[in-house]
Amino acid sequence: MKRPKGRFFIMPTTKDFISALAPLADPSRAPAMRAYMRDQFPFLGIATPARREALKPAIRAFKGAPSAELLSVATELWQLPEREYQYAALDLMAAQWKQFGSADLPALLDFVLRKPWWDSVDGMAGIIGDVLRFEHHEMDCAIKHDSFWMRRIALLHQLGWRGRTDEMRLFRYSLALGHENEFFIQKAIGWALRDYARHAPHNVAQFINENKMGLSKLSIREAAKHIMP
């Protein structure tokens, strides 16, 4: 949706997102969705396809909006209790990621530490990765962060970069965290290496062979899934 020229245009608000989702709430689905996330968050009970279809007009209206407007609405959505509102914030930021720049990185990373679980963290990894793919992607502070969720972001932000992947950074980060026992870190190392192996299988295979003592069995197993023996 293009912004009308020559007259005032009202940007959708958080209330518009709520109004779009509230009628779709299904209390009968909510308990199973909550259980799947280990009872971390309450749910409205809305399936992902229905949520995204309902929010298309509001999200489309943010095309070309300043990053501050995007972050403001995303922040308000994030503060709401039901998990679908965090998903709505992720959908909004993912759809309009081109409005963000490296200057917005601190604000984007701030979302990682609020109501963190693998679903929101991995969603933010994709958004941050999109933003940094074409800009300076220094994540050395994140890889040393006290929160393992932030360290997971540092590992995963290059997913899908293929030829743009900073191979040395990926390998360095993997080794830096290879000793950790945290499941979400071990899994992330394997996932990041497996993704890059689609572009450079020989390089990943060599890295694994040379660093078997520095990586967990889980990371190695995940990384080598699609590498020919």
Image (cartoon, rainbow, N blue to C red):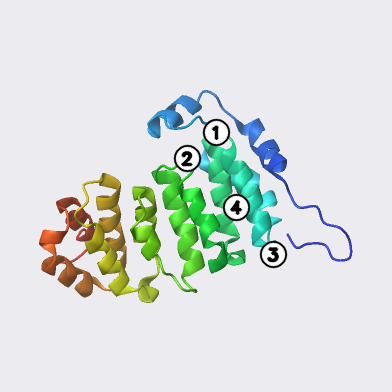
Q: Amino acid at mark 3?
A: Gly
The reply to whether dot 2 and dot 1 touch (C-beta < 8 Å) is: no
Q: CA distance from mark 1 to mark 3?
A: 28 Å
Residue 72 in the image: x percent, y percent?
Answer: 65, 50
Residue that mark 1 sits on:
82
Q: Quick one: quadrant of the N terminus?
A: bottom right
- For the residue marked with disc 4, what is the amino acid? Leu
Location of residue 205 with respect to 155 vertically, above or below? below
**Which numbered disc covers residue 64?**
3
Q: Is residue 178 above or below residue 115?
A: below
Q: Nearer the viewer, residue 226 or 163?
A: 163
- Sequence-wise, which precedes: disc 2 or disc 4? 4
Q: Residues within 10 Å of mark 4 (few under 14, many from 20)?
A: many
> Which residue corresponds to the image point at 43% horizontal and 56% vertical from the top-left?
125
Disc 2 is placed on an element classified as loop
What amino acid type should be assigned to the residue bearing mark 2? Lys
The mark nearer the N terminus, 3 or 2, is: 3
The numbered mark, 2 or 1, whose residue comes first in the sequence reads 1
Amino acid at circle 1: Glu
- Dot label at residue 92: 4
Label disc, if present, on residue 115 of the rendered structure: 2
Q: Is residue 28 above or below residue 105?
A: above
Horizontal relation, residue 92 to residue 214: left or right: right
Q: Give the CA distance from mark 4 to mark 1.
A: 16 Å
